[in-house]
Image (cartoon, helix red, strand yellow):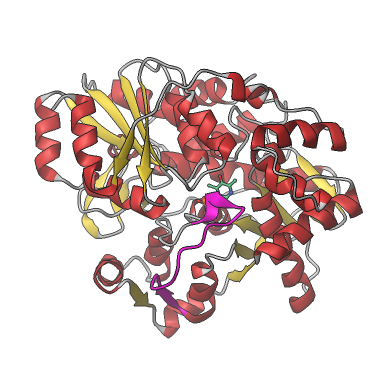
Amino acid sequence: MLYYSTRSLNKKVTSSEAIINGIAEDGGLYVPEYLPKIENLKELLDLNYKQLACVVLNKFFTDFTKEEIKECVYNAYNEKFRSNEIAPLKKCEDMYFLELFHGATLAFKDMALSILPHLMTTAVKKHKLEKEVVILTATSGDTGKAALEGFKDVEGIKIIVFFPRDGVSDVQKMQMITQVGNNTHVIMLEGNFDDAQNGVKEIFVDQELKDQLLEKNIILSSANSINIGRLVPQIVYYIYAYMNLVRNKEIKLKEEINIGVPTGNFGNILAAYYAKQMGLPINKLICASNENNILTDFINTGVYDINRKFKTTTSPSMDILISSNLERLLYEITTKDSGVVTSYMNSLKNKSAYKINEKQISNISDFYGDYAKEIDVTNAIKEVYEKYNYVIDTHTAVAYHVCKNYKNISKDNKKIVIASTASPFKFAGSVYRALNKCNYEYNDFEFINKLSEDFNIDIPSPIKDIDKLEVLHQQVCLKSTMKETVCRMLKV
Ligand SMILES: *Cc1c(COP(=O)(O)O)cnc(C)c1O
């Protein structure tokens, strides 16, 4: 299996090269030349998470040996996860929350970022690169910490994370600025997530910088979901959830389900789309946005238009206007026409908008798009608690609201799996306020304790007493000085 750039079909690379490079030279994203099929669903029924991960990864990362994949998988999904199942399902009538937050940093980013460092170091060894890899990452809050945890103290790799200073929760910020590890750098950016992501993308395609770095034996790579090494491991849990439903006799083998995903950068839902293309019986992919509802508009009208106000919401990991991974969907729905994808991306850059044609609109009919307003999020958290005695986080609440609406409008009564992307403790303030109607001005750390005490849930170990940790990173930078900052850090 080889990988193309979404923006040109000329140059193919192997999976290990795609993982090392992160992003293609032309600024496009790497995509697999075809989506491999699941030949026999039944065979997957009795596999545990690690075994299933091996099966899926072997189909995509074909220049890794089976032993290499196995080692990566077993090093990733180990006791760092607080659930033996890795990704358990919580049933609430005909909706099932797929809990993806039992890893080191309490968000679903751990599912892929636990394994990416292993894939990356294996790939580097394979190519006998003998270079230092610098992971450059922009984060809306959760990726940064998950990447820092995954890559800390990994030999031959440095990691630099930019996060928007005022765009992340207190807990997210504290998680990052207290990060240990002798190869970790964390920088606060005066701007929003899109600024951070654009800045990082510009650094990636800066040929002059690339040459300077090469002289110093350094190559840049990415831990964002633009890296195919992050996307593929995310396919695994959708298949796993499906098999879990079959095993528990909630559905019959081959029965279709719907999948709801709280969406930001479009990585997580794209993995579900890939799973569908591979043959997993999925009917609708329910794309749930918060008030930054650009994807809702795109799915319903075919117009992607970022000429709108950026909003800061209680689901900050979805406060995004430029959903990078949509480029990979465009590639599929234009039947792999890299010329058309390039023209849309240029239009996005120059006119801040693009419009797909009727045929392409019909090719996204697998998706249902809608969004939740802030009040809907509060109500969803309350409703799920009152009905099921179960506390969900703000991002998951966005998806719950949209999925419930979908069910009411469509009368489609297929079972729905909702990607539960974060622990409620990660956004304790918003969750507690939703459940308690209180306006007390606690800080986030006090809210963690309140949430635990009042609702009788244990605080997950990684954030216990996080406010008492030593702050190790305090550097601030501007949009215009991101490159300079990176250069200074790497001494070029
Ligand atoms: C990153 C994130 C999302 C959005 O996922 P994408 O793959 O960027 O669409 C949703 N919820 C949480 C908690 C996240 O951390």
Task: Give whichever of 48, 40 is nearer the camera.
Answer: 48
- Could one spot residue 35 in this view of the protein? yes
Question: Percent position (x, y) of residue 333?
Answer: 42, 69
Task: Give whichever of 44, 172 is nearer the camera.
Answer: 172
Q: State left or right for residue 434 relative to residue 86.
A: right
Split into 4 quadrants, where in the image is the N terminus? top left
In the image, residue 106 sits, relative to residue 193, either above or below, namely: above
Split into 4 quadrants, where in the image is the C terminus? top left
Q: Is residue 376 magenta?
A: no
Task: Give whichever of 300, 41 is nearer the camera.
Answer: 300
Q: Quadrant of residue 162?
A: top left
Q: Is residue 318 magenta?
A: yes
In the image, residue 23 sits, relative to residue 302, either above or below, namely: above
Q: State left or right for residue 251 relative to residue 218.
A: right
Q: Residue at x 24, y 58 (%)?
A: 9
- Could one spot residue 392 in this view of the protein? no
Question: Percent position (x, y) of residue 224?
Answer: 41, 42
Task: Report the span colored magenta.
Answer: 302-319
Task: Give whichever of 397, 82 is nearer the camera.
Answer: 397
Q: State left or right for residue 303 relative to residue 55.
A: left
Question: Percent position (x, y) of residue 184?
Answer: 38, 23
